[in-house]
Image (cartoon, rainbow, N blue to C red):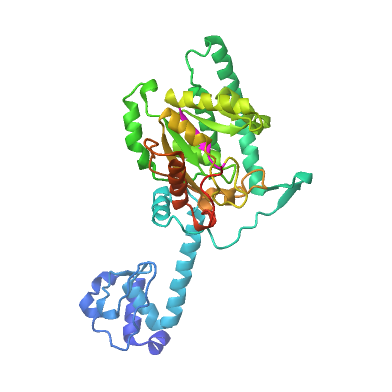
Amino acid sequence: MILSRQLPPLALLLLLASCFNVSNSFSSSSLSKLPSSAPQCQQNTMMMTTCDNNSVGANSVIGGISASRHLSRTALFGTKRVGEEMGQKESRLKNLSKFFRSSRRRNSSTELSAAIAANPGGGSEKKEFVPRPIITFGSSGLKLNLFGTIYGSVAIFLGIFWYAGLWLCDLFDRVTFRKIDPFFRVPITLGHLWGRTLLFIMRCFPVITGKENLKELRELNKKKKRGERQPVMYVANHCSWMDIPFVAMAIGWQNYKIIAKQELLKVPILSKSMRQCDHIVLDRTNRRSQLATYKKAVQYLKDGVDLVTFAEGTRSRNGRLGSFKGGAFKMAETAGARIVPLSISYAADIQPLDYVFPIRRSRAIPGSVHVGMPITTEGKTDDQVVEEVFNAIAEHLPDSQKPEPGTPFSAK
């Protein structure tokens, strides 16, 4: 009785209807008779709708509660308090969604690919990332943070199985005199499996765009024998160790050879993979080695095995695209290969030059690779081919990685 004296009859009636779940007995016409002084509904950001009392039925839902209950609570406590409660509920839902945001299934790579394709020059995150805690190794200056420690531990653990598989491949090749797998497809597949597993566990998958540019070329090669296939040379920018697994993800389950510097043969496990996969190793100080590398690369292209090269010759110190060296392009011209430009974005933000392992997940930036349209070398001079590939890569790089003004496309 005390409550009935303090509340208007209409507010009490609506409250009772809400408590006993009899909202179905109220029609939209009865609600439309509410006095015009009744407060309007607050805009609900969760439902993305704006309404007033004359357009809300009793069975409507506002912010997860029925319209009748919403109106009764508004009449009892006022618009401000009800709005605060709805805001608190919305905030809790947003905080809960952040927990699932890192999920690969929910963070659709298709949506990310579309966003990157629509804005290729967009910058990475504005807030600077501080990779703490950091361990620095002696005079080398190399650093390691917590994420890198976990990444390295997983890589080494998986590397044990990778190394065992490479050893078995080596034994198999010796027994069969390398006649069953002459182009070393099996060890390439093992390395690709190791890399994909590592990137999956650590959530370091790059976003791949432009793969449809390879569809026509690969469909054509499927119908031909190995010696008759159209050879392909992939040319990418280089600013981080993450470029290698990113390129492998962009190429997919293909047999390919990487043109790499001789210093990589000093890295444990990786050196075993380089030799067993028969990747092309270049000694920059030996002219004879360079000639042998050139002949070996051209022969692989003629046999239908794809090549991967970083035309800058070394990692960029500032992350920007640098001048290209012309040796790789001459290989493509000699073998009649198509050149596919690969634009790798934000790899240096994932693993900077002075860090042993990556410092963060690539999905948080995100790291990406754009596969460009195949470029033919027929009827073009060396400079024309180099310039076309240079511009194709630069076009899909973010502003922070585009070449500095006045950068020559070829380093002669």
Residue at the left extreme, as displayed: 29
Q: Which of 292/152 is in front?
A: 292
Question: For this view, does 264 lie left or right of residue 204?
Answer: right
Q: Position of residue 101 (x, y in %)?
A: 48, 54
Question: For this view, does 26 lie left or right of residue 41?
Answer: left
Q: Which of 105/9 is in front?
A: 105
The quadrant in which residue 388 appears is: top left
Look at the image and tell me whether residue 162 can be seen: no
Q: How many marks?
A: 0
Main SS of the magenta part reads: strand
Asked whether residue 218 is drawn in magenta, I would say: no
Asked whether residue 306 is drawn in magenta, I would say: yes
Look at the image and tell me whether residue 57 can be seen: yes
Residue pictured at 44% horizontal, 29% vertical: 334
Quadrant of image for the N terminus: bottom left
The quadrant in which residue 314 appears is: top right
Residue pictured at 48% horizontal, 67% vertical: 91
Q: Which residues are magenta?
A: 305-312
Q: Position of residue 412 (x, y in %)?
A: 56, 42
Residue pictured at 43% horizontal, 77% vertical: 83
Residue pictured at 65% horizontal, 54% vertical: 131
Q: Which of 266/297 is in front?
A: 297
Q: Position of residue 269 (x, y in %)?
A: 64, 29
